[in-house]
Amino acid sequence: MNPAYSAPREHPLVLETYEVVIAALLLAGGWLAWYTARERYHFTGLQVAELACYLFIGMTALYSAAYLFLTARLRRESQWPHPPLVVRPNRDERATREAWIQDAVVLGYDVHGKPWLWPDRVRVMQGIVLGMTGSGKTTLLRNIITQDLCRVADLPKTATTYRW
């Protein structure tokens, strides 16, 4: 026989488990709020129940909003295909200027809106652009050329928004 079966089991005391303590504190707090509302503020039982429902709905909405905000990045990464990303022109212009300071060009943006930079020290090596028809190879090359021309000529902002 396995010695684990014959060994006495040691369980923690009920008040030492945090789940029981938290549940007891919540029940005590709920009872105290109910008692205070009834005795001090002279609410009826239905009024207290209605306030408890509103509190529950408000807490659920607050928890849901916090959950959606805190997990937005993970949900964006796991969604496939990724939803289209829209980058404001002024943000694109700022990313391009910062890339020029670092001697690089902006190839595009990832799913979170962070720019992908292609440094000049890497560009001197061979680069291959592959993709299906209509996937944006020509547009990518035109954007790289446009960024190079604007960086060398240091043209005003309106020149970078030129469409081919």
Image: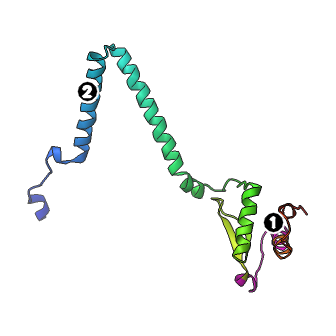
Q: Which residue is mark 1?
A: 136
Looking at the image, residue 55 sits to the left or right of residue 111; the answer is left
Given the image, on which type of amino acid does mark 2 rest?
Leu
Looking at the image, residue 128 sits to the left or right of residue 112; the answer is right
Q: Is residue 142 magenta?
A: yes
Q: Quadrant of the C terminus?
A: bottom right
Counting the numbered discs, the total is: 2
Residue at horizontal 51%, vertical 41%?
65
Q: Secondary structure at mark 2?
A: helix
Q: Which residue is mark 2?
A: 32
Q: Is residue 100 magenta?
A: no
Does 121 sit above or below residue 109? below
Residue 91 image position (x, y, % from top left)? 72, 58
Q: Nearer the viewer, residue 158 or 15?
A: 158
Given the image, on which type of amino acid does mark 1 rest?
Gly
Residue 80 image position (x, y, % from top left)? 63, 56
Looking at the image, residue 22 sits to the left or right of residue 71; the answer is left
Q: Nearer the viewer, residue 155 or 88?
A: 155
Q: Nearer the viewer, residue 144 or 18?
A: 144
Q: Nearer the viewer, residue 92 or 30?
A: 92
Range of residues picked out in magenta? 121-145
Residue at horizontal 89%, vertical 61%?
163
Mark 2–mark 1 distance (CA, rounded to whole Å): 65 Å
